[in-house]
Image: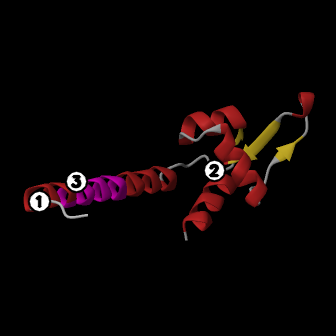
Amino acid sequence: MNLPKQESRQLKAFVINRLRRMERQQKDFFQRLENKNDLDDYLTVEEIQKEFGISRSTFNRYKLKGLKILQNGYKNKITIKKGDYIEFIKNEKK
């Protein structure tokens, strides 16, 4: 795949900018996690999805990988301790 020099430079610049943006987003995400004081709060699956911007399939994948959940109470509603979720994400990224 031989690209002209101009296109090659543009592609390289695009990839570098995309990586920098992703690094900034990841850094911001972890800063927001560390600033949360209410780590003992229990959240529903829907609240986890909304607060952390994940899909239900991602949540299910995390659950299969060992995310601690509580499934009791009214209609066996699933709840997750916010601190447990954050610790799981931090360990997942290592």
Label 3: which residue?
14
The residue mark sitting in front, 3 or 1, is: 1
- Indicate the amino acid at tag 2: Leu
Q: Residue furthest top?
A: 75
Mark 2: which secondary structure?
loop
Label 1: which residue?
4
Closer to the chain start, of discs 2 and 1, is 1
Which residue is drawn at the image coordinates 55% and 42% (left, top)? 52
Q: Is residue 21 magenta?
A: yes
- Indicate the amino acid at tag 1: Pro
How many circles with numbers are drawn on the protein?
3
The residue mark sitting in front, 3 or 2, is: 3
Q: Is 29 above or below relative to 79?
A: below
CA distance for labels 3 and 1: 15 Å
Judge from the rendering whether residue 49 lies leftward or rightward of residue 31; answer left or right.
right
Judge from the rendering whether residue 88 lies leftward or rightward of residue 16; answer left or right.
right
